[in-house]
C-alpha cells in the first residue's frame, strides 16, 4: 500500500478514537455561533464603519436657505438653467473650487460640499445667495468665497455657483 | 485558551476599525484641504500638478521626499503634524499607482513636523530642478 494511504489511514483511525460525532457537531456549532457573535462584540463600531454617503434630501434647491448652500456667495445655478449639481448650458464648471461642510437638518449629519463655479458667461443675476458659513478671510485662500473661483476654465467670467455633495464629514466619536 | 482567542479577536477587530477610521479621517482632510485644487482623484487641473500616477516618483530622492512636505500647500496648511503625515501617506497610497515602490516608508509625525518648519518659497523653480534630478536618476538607472 502506498505510504500516503497508510499515513492517512493511521491519522483517520487516531482521530476516530479521540473524537465523537457529537463532539464534532458541538465544535462546528460553537464555531458557527461564535463567528456570528463576533460582529456584536462591544468595540468602537460607530467610529469604524463608513457612513452611507447619500444625504436625506429636503428643502428647495431654488431657495437660498436650502441646506447645501450654507457657504454660498453668488448666484444659484438652480435658478440659472442648471441645478445644484450641474452648470447651465453654455457654461463650464471650474475644476478648481473651494470646499466646506454643511449640516443637513433632514438627517442630522454634516456633509462635505464642493462649491464649483460655472464659468464662461456673464453673471446670471438671479437668486443671489450669500450665507458665508465657514467662510474665511482672503489670507486663507482655500477657504474663502470672496475670490473668483473660475480657475482652470477657458474663461474667467463667473456665471453661477453649484453646491455638490462630495462626501460625509468625518467626526471623531 | 478560548479566552485568549476571544481577546485576540476583539483586539484584531478593534485595530482594523481604528485603521479604517484613520483612513476616513485622512480622506476627509484631503477633501477639505487639498481636493479643491488637486481634484478628487489627484488629477490636478491646468497649472496644478497632477499627482495621480506620479507623486510616488518624488520619494526616490531625499530632496523629493522633503519637497512633498515643504511645498506650501502642505507646510502652511491648517493641519497638525499628525494629520498632515496621515494625509501625505494617504495621497501616496491612493494616487501613486506604479510610481511608488514597495519599500515606501510612511511619513511620521516627527518627520513632517521637522520638515514643515522650512516651507519652500520659489516652488516652481525648485520643482523643475527636482524633476530634472529625478529624470537624470531615472536615465542613469536604465543605462
Image (cartoon, rainbow, N blue to C red):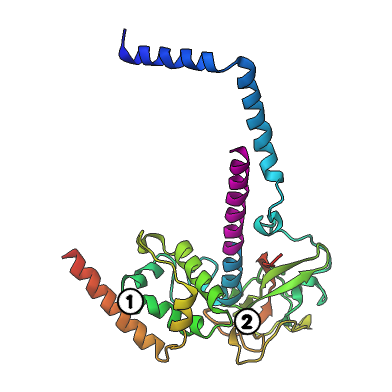
Q: Quadrant of residue A149?
A: bottom right
Frontmost of labels 2 and 1 is 1
Magenta highlight: main SS:
helix
Quadrant position of the N terminus of chain A in the picture: top left
Residue A138 in the magenta stretch? The answer is: no
- Say left or right for B82 vs A162: left
Asked whether the residues under the numbered discs 2 and 1 touch, taking CB atoms below 8 Å apart as contact, a structural biologist would say no
Q: Chain of mark 2?
A: A
Residue A83 image point, x, y percent: 72, 68
In depth, the one of A94 and A37 nearer the eye is A37
Numbered tag placed on residue B62 in the rendering: 1
Q: Residue at x 70, y 72 (%)?
A: A163
Magenta residues, as a range?
A: B1-23
Quadrant position of the C terminus of chain A in the picture: bottom right
Residue marked by disc 2: A121
Q: Quadrant of residue B114?
A: bottom left
**Discs 2 and 1 carry the same chain letter:** no
Numbered tag placed on residue A143 in the rendering: none
In the picture as drawn, the residue positioned furthest to the top comes out as A1
Other residues around mark 2 within 10 Å, as few (<14) / some (14–19) / many (≥20): some
Q: Chain of mark 1?
A: B
- Say left or right for B135 vs A122: left
Residue B10 in the magenta stretch? The answer is: yes
Examine the rendering and report whether any part of residue A83 can be seen. Answer: no
Find numbered disc 2 in the image and state the secondary structure of the residue it sits on.
Answer: loop
Count of numbered circles in the view? 2
Residue B69 image point, x, y percent: 45, 79
Q: Quadrant of residue A53?
A: bottom right
Residue A54 image point, x, y percent: 71, 58
Examine the rendering and report whether any part of residue B90 can be seen. Answer: yes
Amino acid at each position: 500500500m502506498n505510504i500516503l494511504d497508510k499515513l492517512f489511514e493511521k491519522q483517520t483511525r487516531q482521530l476516530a478514537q479521540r473524537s465523537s460525532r457529537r463532539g464534532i457537531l458541538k465544535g462546528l456549532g460553537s464555531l458557527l455561533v461564535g463567528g456570528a457573535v463576533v460582529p456584536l462584540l462591544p468595540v468602537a463600531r460607530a467610529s469604524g464603519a463608513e457612513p452611507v454617503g447619500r444625504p436625506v434630501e429636503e428643502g428647495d434647491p431654488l431657495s437660498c436657505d436650502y441646506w447645501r448652500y450654507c457657504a454660498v456667495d453668488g448666484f444659484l445655478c438652480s435658478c440659472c438653467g442648471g441645478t445644484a449639481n450641474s452648470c447651465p448650458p453654455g457654461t463650464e464648471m471650474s475644476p478648481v473650487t473651494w470646499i466646506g461642510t454643511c449640516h443637513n437638518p433632514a438627517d442630522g449629519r454634516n456633509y462635505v460640499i464642493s462649491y464649483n463655479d460655472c464659468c464662461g458667461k456673464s453673471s446670471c443675476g438671479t437668486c443671489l445667495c450669500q450665507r458665508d458659513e465657514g467662510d474665511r478671510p482672503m489670507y486663507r485662500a482655500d477657504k474663502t468665497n470672496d475670490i473668483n473661483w473660475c480657475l482652470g476654465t477657458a474663461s474667467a467670467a463667473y456665471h453661477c455657483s453649484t453646491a455638490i455633495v462630495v462626501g460625509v464629514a468625518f467626526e471623531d466619536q | 485558551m478560548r479566552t485568549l482567542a476571544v481577546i485576540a479577536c476583539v483586539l484584531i477587530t478593534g485595530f482594523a476599525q481604528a485603521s479604517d477610521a484613520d483612513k476616513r479621517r485622512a480622506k476627509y482632510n484631503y477633501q477639505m484641504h487639498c481636493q479643491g485644487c488637486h481634484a478628487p482623484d489627484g488629477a490636478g487641473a491646468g497649472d496644478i500638478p497632477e499627482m495621480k500616477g506620479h507623486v510616488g516618483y518624488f520619494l526616490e530622492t531625499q530632496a523629493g521626499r522633503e519637497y512633498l512636505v515643504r511645498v506650501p500647500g502642505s507646510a502652511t496648511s491648517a493641519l497638525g503634524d499628525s494629520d498632515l503625515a496621515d494625509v501625505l501617506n494617504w495621497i501616496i497610497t491612493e494616487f501613486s499607482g506604479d510610481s511608488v515602490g514597495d519599500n515606501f516608508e510612511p511619513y511620521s509625525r516627527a518627520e513632517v513636523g521637522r520638515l514643515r518648519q522650512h516651507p519652500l518659497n520659489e516652488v516652481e523653480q525648485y520643482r523643475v530642478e527636482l524633476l530634472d534630478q529625478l529624470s537624470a536618476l531615472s536615465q542613469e538607472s536604465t543605462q
